[in-house]
Amino acid sequence: MIIKTKESASWLIGAVAGICAAIALFALGITWWLALIASVLIFVAVSLFALWMIVKYVAYKLRPIYSMVLSRDVHTGDIAEKLKEQKVEEVSDELNAWADSNDKEIMRLKEAEKFRKQYLGNVAHELKTPIFNIQGYISTLLDGGLEDEIINRKYLERAEKSVERMINILSDLDTISRLDSDMNQMHCESFDMVALCKDFAEQSEMEAAKRNITLIVKGADNLPSTCWVNADKFYIGQVLDNLIVNSIRYGKEGGTTKITCRDMLDKVLVEVEDNGIGIAKSDLPRVFERFYRTDKGRSREQGGTGLGLAIVKHIVENHGEKVSVRSELGKGSTFTFTLNKVKL
């Protein structure tokens, strides 16, 4: 027999007591109707007393659990009052739900701690290289290289590059920190997405020319275009800058980078496509992680901090949208994101 409620438990105890009393009274020769009345009264009295005792006992046992759940001292009487209104299994469900929620929070905190440690380790690793380089160059100069005009200029130029790399890392870290902060608010406005793409393509023309890469913006031959969006213009500019610079750095010599804006009814789809080295299938799920590089040696050589795509992901997601990538080794990569379209 499965007893699911405190009431059924008390009735069972009362019934056993009433039956035992009736048998005893019959054995003593008491008339049947007196025995029946007595057994009913005993059933009621024992059931009520048993119910009171069960509530008191359960409340006493639950008090430390409730105190822990509510993070304050809870009196037994408070729990007893609660049990009068609820079934025991409802209280059990409530505590199980709290336990599940607590387990999920613990898992989230463990993941956050793991990420924090990994993040700090990555920051230390990224800053260590330029700092040690600067230290080495300065030590060489102090040990006599300063008097040699060829060595001192070369080493000072290398030290300057390491300083620039540190500044880029710290600048990207500051951007990531501001994007992570709840205080950061996007200042959305309406602007022509094609015009913005053309502006950033023009700004990147000199860097593209060094590798003979052609930049093409597709979406409208004449401005203004129909691809107007509602977004934070400054941060979306950062997204375009990161994606275009990446396409140039990892593009093919003499290749092409296409920036395309497509009208998708209530959205504007933006694509940055190159025909460069591409990304391995195994690396695709992690390209937006902080400090993750598919080609670590070349990334540092090109001056990348490993935070550009993480910044892109943060900005796009802060707009309530998604960024994605499709790529194939040796054929190139296409980064895609959407923004809310403005009805003209």
Image (cartoon, rainbow, N blue to C red):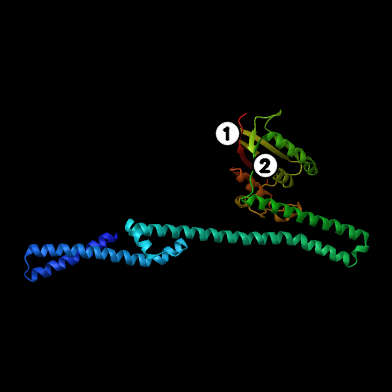
Q: Nearer the viewer, residue 230 or 289?
A: 230
Task: Answer yes or no: is residue 298 visible.
Answer: no
Would you say 170 lies left or right of 98 here?
A: right
Q: Position of residue 239 (x, y in %)?
A: 68, 44
Alpha carbon separation for disc pair 2 and 1: 18 Å
Secondary structure beneath dot 2 equals helix
| Residue tagged 2 | 236
Q: Horizontal and vertical percent for residue 112?
A: 58, 59
- Are the residues tagged 2 and 1 within 8 Å (C-beta)? no
Quadrant of the drawing holding the C terminus: top right
- Which residue shows up at 66% across the image and 53% down it? 177
**Quarter assignment of residue 28:** bottom left
Q: Secondary structure at mark 1?
A: loop
> Foreground: 272 or 97?
97
Please tell me in which quadrant of the rendered image residue 91 appears.
bottom left
Give the residue type that dot 2 points to: Ile
Q: Residue at x 60, y 59 (%)?
A: 115
Crowding at label 1, few (<14), some or many (≥20) Cα neighbours within 10 Å? few
Q: Residue at x 76, y 44 (%)?
A: 253
* Disc nearer the start of the sequence (2/1): 2
Which mark, residue 266?
A: 1
What kind of residue is marked 1? Asp
Residue 178 coordinates in the image, percent (x, y) = 66, 51
Can residue 319 be seen in the rendering of this structure? yes
